[in-house]
C-alpha cells in the first residue's frame, strides 16, 4: 500500500487514521458477529452453549487482559503493543473465518480478545499523544465519531454480509482495514512509554482472575447441559469462586495490582461502575438474543434483522455528541438516572414477546433501551473520571473498561443458564418456537432487575460536581478509553 509522504505536519493525522482503522473494526465486532450467529449455528451444528462462547470467550479474554495490556504498553511502548494487538486480532479474524468447527471458532475468538485488549486500551492513548493541546479535542472527537459510526453500521453491514455472502465474511471484512491500519500506524505513530511505569506484571493475579471468571462463566453456561448438581458443574463453579475470592483477598497487597479495589471507595466512581456493569451487561443480553429471535422465531432475514435492531444503536449515535450540553444543563446524576430508568422500562417492555409478536411489540423497548445507552454511556465515563485524581486516571479508566467486559460475560452466562432452564421446562407440549420465545421473555427479567438496581445505585451514588470537564487522556494515562466499545 503506497502512502503519501508522512511529514511532521501531517504525521499526527496519519496516526489518527491508523488508530481509527483498528478502532473501527473493534467496534464493528460488537454488532456484526451477533447477526451471524444463527447461520454459524446451522453451518457448524453448534449447541446453544457453544454459541454463547462465541461472545463469552472474546469478552473474558478482553476482561482479563485489558488493564495489563495498558501497563505493558506503558513499559514496552504503546505503539509496539498496539501494533502487536492489531496483528493478533487480525490472526484471530482469519482463524475465525476459516474455522471448520466450533472449537476452532471459539479459540479464534479468544485470540481476538487478546489482540483486542491491546487495541482497546492503547488506541486512544496513541491518538492523545500524537496531538498538541490545541488540536487534541478535535482529534478525540473524530476518534469517538468513528467509534459511533462503526456501532451504527454494524447491524446493517452484518446482515448484508451474512445474507449476501456467508457468516464467514463478518470476519474476513476486517482483515484489509486492520492490515492498512497496521501499516499506517507503524509508519506514522511515534513510540512513547512511561519511564516511571512499574514493569512488574501481576502473574498470580492474572491467573486467579482468569480461573475465577472462566470457572464461574463455564459453570453457568454448561450447567444445563452437564446438570446443575453434576460433579463437573460443582467443581468448575467452586474453582471459579475460589479464584475470584483469592483475587479479591491478595490483589490489594501486590505491588502493581490489576484492580485497585480502593477506587471503589469513591462513591461517584462506584456509582458509574455500577451503571456501566448493569447497562452494558443488559446490552450484551439484548444484542445476543434479539437478532436470533428476529431471524429464528419471527422469520426475518439477516439484513432485515440488522435493520430492525438499529433502534438499539442509532439513538446512542445521535445522543452521545450532545452529552456535554445535557450534563451542563441537568447534571450527570439526573441524566444517568433517567437513562437507567429508560433501560429498565425498555427491557420490561421486551418481556411481552411471544412466538407471534409483531415488530410493533419490540420497537418501543428497542428505542427506550437505545436512548438509555445514549444518555448513560458517555456521561458514565465523565462521572467516573471527574471523581478521580489525575494520578489515578489510567488505572480507573482501565478498571472501568474491564468492568464492562466482565458484565457482558456474566450477564450472557446468567441469561443463558436461565434460558436453557426455562426452555427445558416449557418444551413439553409446546412447539420449539413457542418454548424459545417463552424462555427468552422470562429470562429477560434478569436484565430488567439489573437495570432497576443500576437505576437505584446511580441515583444514590453518582454526584454531579459543580464543574465537570471532559477528561482528555494524557500520555500518562494509557489505559483510558472513553469510546463506545461494549
Image (tube, grey):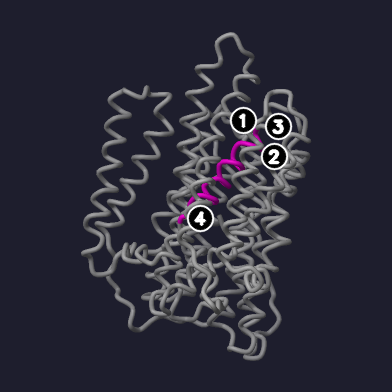
What residue does disc 4 label? 275
Question: In terms of secondary structure, where does tag 2 sit?
Answer: loop
Q: Kindly check if marks 1 and 3 are in contact, taking CB atoms under 8 A apart as contact.
A: no
Extent of the magenta region: 274-292
Q: Earlier in the sequence, mark 4 or mark 1?
A: 1
The label on residue 143 is: none
Q: CA distance from mark 3 to mark 2?
A: 15 Å
Q: Residue at x 73, y 45 (%)?
A: 161
Above or below: residue 439 compared with residue 389:
above
Residue located 53% across and 45% down the image: 452
Q: Is residue 389 left or right of residue 108?
A: left
Could you tell me residue 158's position as x and y percent? 70, 46
Q: Earlier in the sequence, mark 4 or mark 2?
A: 2
What separation in Å lies between label 2 and label 1 (alpha carbons)?
Answer: 10 Å
Which tag, 3 or 2, sits closer to the chain's start?
2
**Magenta span includes 140:** no
Q: Nearer the viewer, mark 1 or mark 3?
A: 3
Which residue is identified by label 1?
Answer: 43
Write the residue at 67% across / 64% down: 320
> What residue is shown with label 2?
166
Amino acid at each position: 500500500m503506497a502512502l503519501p509522504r508522512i511529514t511532521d505536519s501531517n504525521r499526527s493525522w496519519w496516526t489518527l487514521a491508523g488508530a481509527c482503522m483498528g478502532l473501527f473494526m473493534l467496534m464493528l465486532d460488537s454488532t456484526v458477529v451477533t447477526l451471524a450467529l444463527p447461520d454459524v449455528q446451522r453451518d457448524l451444528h453448534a449447541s446453544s452453549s457453544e454459541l454463547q462462547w462465541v461472545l463469552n470467550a472474546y469478552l473474558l479474554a478482553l476482561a482479563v487482559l485489558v488493564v495489563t495490556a495498558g501497563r505493558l504498553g506503558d513499559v514496552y511502548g504503546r505503539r509496539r503493543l498496539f501494533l502487536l494487538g492489531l496483528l493478533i486480532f487480525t490472526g484471530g479474524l482469519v482463524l475465525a473465518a476459516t474455522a471448520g468447527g466450533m472449537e476452532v471458532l471459539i479459540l479464534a475468538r479468544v485470540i481476538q480478545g487478546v489482540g483486542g485488549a491491546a487495541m482497546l486500551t492503547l488506541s486512544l492513548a496513541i491518538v492523545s499523544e500524537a496531538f498538541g493541546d490545541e488540536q487534541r479535542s478535535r482529534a478525540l472527537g473524530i476518534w469517538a465519531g468513528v467509534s459511533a459510526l462503526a456501532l451504527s453500521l454494524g447491524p446493517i453491514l452484518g446482515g448484508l454480509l451474512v445474507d449476501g455472502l456467508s457468516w464467514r465474511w463478518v470476519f474476513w471484512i476486517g482483515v484489509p482495514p486492520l492490515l492498512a491500519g497496521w501499516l499506517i500506524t507503524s509508519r506514522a505513530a511515534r513510540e512513547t512509554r512511561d519511564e516511571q511505569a512499574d514493569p512488574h506484571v501481576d502473574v498470580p493475579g492474572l491467573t486467579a482472575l482468569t480461573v475465577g471468571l472462566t470457572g464461574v462463566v463455564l459453570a453457568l453456561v454448561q450447567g444445563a447441559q452437564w446438570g446443575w448438581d453434576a460433579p463437573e458443574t460443582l467443581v468448575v463453579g467452586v474453582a471459579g469462586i475460589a479464584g475470584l475470592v483469592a483475587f479479591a483477598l491478595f490483589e490489594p497487597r501486590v505491588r502493581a495490582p490489576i484492580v485497585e479495589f480502593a477506587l471503589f471507595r469513591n462513591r461517584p466512581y462506584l456509582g458509574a461502575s455500577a451503571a456501566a456493569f448493569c447497562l452494558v451487561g443488559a446490552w450484551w443480553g439484548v444484542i445476543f438474543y434479539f437478532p436470533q429471535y428476529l431471524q429464528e422465531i419471527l422469520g426475518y432475514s439477516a439484513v432485515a434483522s440488522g435493520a430492525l435492531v438499529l433502534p438499539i444503536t442509532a439513538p446512542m449515535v445521535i445522543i452521545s455528541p450532545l452529552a456535554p450540553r445535557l450534563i451542563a444543563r441537568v447534571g450527570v446524576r439526573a441524566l444517568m438516572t433517567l437513562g437507567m430508568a429508560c433501560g429498565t422500562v425498555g427491557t420490561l417492555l421486551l418481556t411481552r414477546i411471544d412466538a407471534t409478536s409483531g415488530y410493533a411489540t419490540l420497537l418501543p423497548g428497542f428505542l427506550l433501551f437505545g436512548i438509555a445507552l445514549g444518555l448513560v454511556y458517555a456521561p458514565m465515563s465523565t462521572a467516573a473520571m471527574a471523581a478521580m485524581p489525575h494520578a489515578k486516571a489510567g488505572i480507573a479508566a482501565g478498571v472501568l473498561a474491564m468492568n464492562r467486559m466482565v458484565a457482558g460475560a456474566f450477564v450472557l452466562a446468567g441469561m443463558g443458564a436461565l434460558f436453557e432452564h426455562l426452555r427445558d421446562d416449557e418444551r413439553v407440549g409446546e412447539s420449539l418456537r413457542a418454548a424459545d420465545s417463552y424462555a427468552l421473555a422470562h429470562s429477560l427479567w434478569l436484565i430488567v432487575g439489573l437495570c432497576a438496581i443500576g437505576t437505584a445505585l446511580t441515583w444514590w451514588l453518582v454526584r454531579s460536581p459543580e464543574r465537570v470537564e471532559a477528561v482528555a487522556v494524557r500520555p500518562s494515562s494509557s489505559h483510558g478509553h472513553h469510546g463506545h466499545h461494549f
